[in-house]
Image (tube, helix red, strand yellow):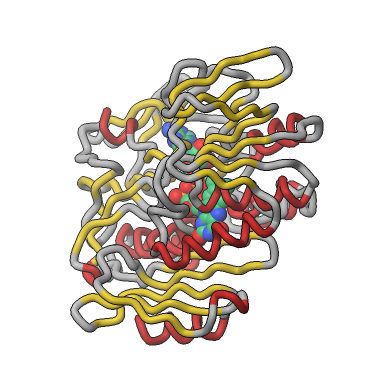
Amino acid sequence: MTEPIVIVGAGQAGIRAAETLRKMGWEDPIIMYGDEAWPPYQRPPLSKKFLAGELEEEQLLLQGEAFYERNAIEFIPGSRVLEIDPAAHQLDVSGRDSPLKYSKLLLTTGCRPRALAVPGADDTRLETLRTITDVNRIRGKIEHCSRPAIIGGGYIGLEVAAVLQGMGKQVTVLEAQDRLLGRVTSPEVAEFFRKLHGGHGVDIRLNASVIRLETRGKETMIVLDDESEVAADFMLVAIGAIANDELARQAGLHCYDGIMVDELCKAAPDIYAAGDCTRFPLPRYGRSVRLESVQNANDQARAAAQSMLGEGDPYNALPWFWSDQYDVKFQIAGLSDGYDALEMDGDPETGSFSVSYYRDGKLIAVDAINAARAHMMARRTLA
Ligand code: FAD
């Protein structure tokens, strides 16, 4: 028997890789370490149905207990990999006395919410959202709040705004840029979402940069750069995420906003990485990217597992993504940044339309709003 394949990080990518290794016939041990208390679970519902109380924790799990037993995957929850020694092929894990040897290592450490770096950000009314634990804590707080504020108008912030509005709260969204969803879509689609939220009664404030927080009794004053104030009794910071690449850095791996891997998902000899924590070359767009999506976590983890067993093809999957807000399903195929022309199909006023993005006359991405067929067709065309 050879040394185990060790997977660091028990999330979407970690479980997909473990499944793939077994499907491909790897018969030696697989050990998966996760620093959370749960086995791998889906994060998308955390800012949607789970936050709204429409799903139980068990319904989030990507695999039941039997799966780990049946596939002889040793999953160790609540343990953090602290250090990797690539030369010795071994790692240190919290709660373990001696280093653990590995034959191959897969890093699927994900990312974490970017913190709000302003005076007063240690306010106990301020939360971020990434894990089940976060949502359980947030739920306890929002139950009693009436004026929540969301700092950051990206997809997580807007999904949470929609859920809170649905609970009858008076929600304010503060976005530093002059439009919503700046990292995800075009001004045209962003405007649709601004109107959507406005129509539901959410107070959307653009060009609203938070410079400090001041606790005043039962509320916090969120002070903006024009010195105006917004009162809130709960705050969620949703201003993007940072790759968990410190472990890789410590091991001497090349990192730049994520663990740098090649097209075979390889970071160093016998060390691979997949999912939110990686920056990788994507030939179809001719550049390197770091993606935070279920699609990439799944597809790249499968690709990494194949590479680990010496059967990998260069990873070049089509990115796709979705977001749910109220009764709107927003689906993205491809990457639209860098587009030089767009074409709208349908009328945003009807609530169902799609936008095709082109660069040098070539289709690069399609956003579909309540237009599932357009999304599926776009995925076929772009693939
Ligand atoms: P993760 O799922 O984050 O897993 C990484 C795990 O590794 C974590 O549990 C982490 O704690 C653990 N870890 C880190 N370091 C160590 C260590 N040293 N030792 C042990 N364990 C470690 N994507 C979509 O496509 N559509 C959506 O609608 C959508 N909605 C989302 C909503 C929310 C609120 C969030 C947070 C994400 C959403 N995403 C969505 C993104 C998607 O969930 C992620 O892209 C996906 O979970 C990434 O999987 P991953 O395995 O790379 O990372």
Judge whether 38 appears above or below 291 on screen: above
Viewer-nearest residue: 378 or 288: 378
**79 relative position to 138: left or right:** left
Q: Where does the image place residue 151, in percent across and percent down from the top left?
A: 53, 37
Q: Where does the image place residue 338, in percent across and percent down from the top left?
A: 25, 65
Viewer-nearest residue: 84 or 275: 275
Q: Where does the image place residue 336, in percent across and percent down from the top left?
A: 33, 67
Q: Is residue 383 visible?
A: no
Viewer-nearest residue: 75 or 172: 172
**324 relative position to 120: left or right:** right
Q: Residue at x 59, y 22 (%)?
A: 221
**125 relative position to 374: left or right:** right
Q: In which quadrant will I find the C terminus?
A: bottom left
Residue 379, quarter of the rendered image: bottom left
Residue 299, quarter of the rendered image: bottom left
Q: Residue at x 28, y 46 (%)?
A: 271
Looking at the rendered structure, the number of numbered marks drawn on it comes to 0
Q: Is residue 223 visible?
A: yes
Judge whether 319 appears above or below 236 on screen: below
Q: Where does the image place residue 52, in percent across and percent down from the top left?
A: 75, 49
Q: Residue at x 47, y 43 (%)?
A: 175
Viewer-nearest residue: 11 or 192: 192
Judge whether 322 appears above or below 103 on screen: below
Q: Residue at x 27, y 28 (%)?
A: 250
